Amino acid sequence: MIQFKEFTLDNGLRVIVHEDHTSPMAVLNVLYDVGSRDEEEAHTGFAHLFEHLMFSGSKHIPVYDEPLQRVGGENNAFTSPDITNYYLSLPAQNIETGFWLESDRMLDLAFSEQGLEVQRKVVVEEFKQNYLNQPYGDVWLKLRPLAYEQHPYKWATIGKEISHIEEATMDIVKAFHRKHYSPSNAILVVAGNVTFEKAKELTEKWFGPIPAGEKYTRAIPAEPKQPGPRVLETTADVPLSAIYKAYHMPHRTHEDYYAIDLISDILGRGKSSRLYENLVKEQKLFNSIAASVTGSIEPGLLIIQGKLNEGVDLHEANRAIEAINQELMEQLVEEEELNKVKNQAETSLVFSEIELLNRAMNLAYGKLLGDANFVNTEGEKIQAVTPQDIQRCAKQVLDPNNCSTLLYKAEKKEKPVEQEA
């Protein structure tokens, strides 16, 4: 159980304080309610680009990292389709440095053509290295638009096309900041060896004067129900052929979310899962296989992905996956198997609460979902799932008509023969 207290500033900044006096450290986690789903299709990759720009310096702090490092702190950030999250940790006695740093870049980010050019090059290189020039790197660039036709989840966080980042202008960047980076669109978590009273005092001092800004209201198109199976076949110079299957599922706070998450665990969590036992160990069709859910705030995906053994036909392997899915749809799961994955899921929850930073992140995300206490109720929701829930949800989600399949065929490129001089 994570204990916490909350308050909200007049400018709309939602604040959560989690005291842990067993730690000498303190954490500041700032979650901005903006991700790649909030981008325009002609200008994608901006949420991620902005994550980089936020470290380029603010009005009073030319180099973000230097003051933090001088007081023994460290920081990082990440962007997802749903959120952008910034976090820092430092010795608790130096916590005010963290407030100073985070408030200054929320209020007065230093926009410069040079800074934009530097970060634009960094992101373009990341796009090339991680998505274009790495084996299987382009999978999500292909699978997302196959699974989604309308919703902005159809492009990856890095962006739809590299040209969108290359052509980013200062005007578009500034407009993105005004729209999304304001107190009313953020959640601050202060955690560690700090009292609620001190955290509130520092929050009011450093964040209180920041103007609220205009509250951003989403108008994201809903993804229509998929009318039938979709299949895309592609080839690439990769070691092994692979299969990626994406099934539409409800959003993160839907009552069936935990049953579907457990379905993914039954199918593909670890070496005792159904897919691994059957298709890797017994039939030896796959070299590896796993299943998971995206956990998206809006309707997301259950993903099955596996790499085939050499010589195995992609269509044969795909039929083998669907046969195992069909069994879960037709037969009630045994209590013993369900309890095993329930206990695995609860263990993961417990481990996620060990690190102070993880607790801060979980509280921020829960607050974004509607209740900071969300993290403390997940265990009960997992344990409440029944075999009947599993079967009912499996019939809905694992329906072949609800599936988009990427057949990723390994095709070795012949290297040019070197001519002798």
Image: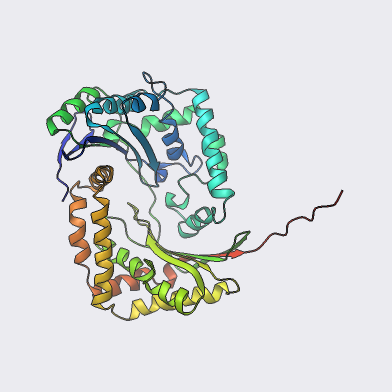
State the image coordinates of residue 218 (x, y, percent, origin top left).
Answer: 34, 43
Residue 120 left/right relative to 384? right
Can you name the residue that lies furthest to the right here? 421
Residue occupying the point 55% across, 39% down = 124
Q: Vertical placement of 384 versus 172: above or below? A: below
Is residue 157 among what the camera can see? yes
State the image coordinates of residue 403 (x, y, percent, origin top left).
Answer: 44, 67
Can you name the residue that lies furthest to the top here? 60
Q: Vertical placement of 31 versus 288: above or below? A: above
State the image coordinates of residue 212 (x, y, percent, origin top left).
Answer: 27, 28
Is residue 105 among what the camera can see? no
State the image coordinates of residue 173 (x, y, percent, origin top left).
Answer: 45, 30
Q: In which quarter of the image is residue 204?
A: top left
Q: Vertical placement of 398 versus 36: above or below? A: below
Q: Observer-nearest residue: 13 or 314?
A: 314
Residue occupying the point 22% across, 47% down = 370
Q: In which quarter of the image is residue 7?
A: top left
Q: Vertical placement of 296 versus 388: above or below? A: above
Figure label count: 0
